[in-house]
Amino acid sequence: MEQATDDTIIIFIMIVVVVCEAFIGIASVLRQGVLKDQKVLQMKKTNAELRSMLHGVNKNSRLNKQQLVELVVATC
């Protein structure tokens, strides 16, 4: 009887630990970049990098950085 109770408690503790680790993993992923604004991330790139992302788009040579970021976000 005690062995069955001990096994049940150990399994329950293992499940709680696994669930807690899963929540911590999901929280760290969300904090590190999934929910960050794409415009803010794109503003950190140079104009040359933004233009290379717009390889198939015409008439992007005269655009400023803000316009390039808007275009990148719109095309993605």
Image: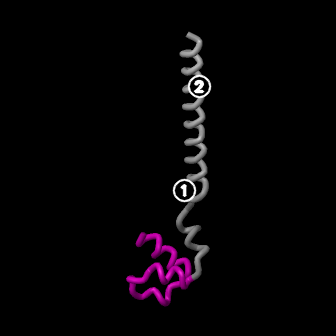
Residue 39, quarter of the rendered image:
bottom right
Residue 23, quarter of the rendered image:
top right
Magenta stretch: dominant secondary structure = helix
Nearer to the camera, 46 or 71: 46
Which numbered disc covers residue 18?
A: none
Instruction: Tell me which amino acid carries mark 1.
Output: Leu
Question: Is tag 2's residue or tag 1's residue first in the polypeptide sequence?
Answer: 2
Q: Residue at x 54, y 56 (%)?
A: 35
Residue, disc 2: 10
Q: Residue at x 38, y 83 (%)?
A: 56
Nearer to the camera, 9 or 46: 9
- Quarter of the picture holding the C terminus: bottom left
Q: Residue at x 49, y 73 (%)?
A: 70
Which x, y percent locates residue 25? 58, 47
Is residue 55 shown in magenta? yes
Secondary structure of the residue carrying numbered label 2: helix
Question: Where does the magenta region start and end?
Answer: 47-76
- Quarter of the picture holding the N terminus: top right
| Vertical side of 66 occupied by 34: above or below | above
Instruction: Tell me which amino acid carries mark 2.
Output: Ile
Which x, y percent locates residue 16? 58, 31
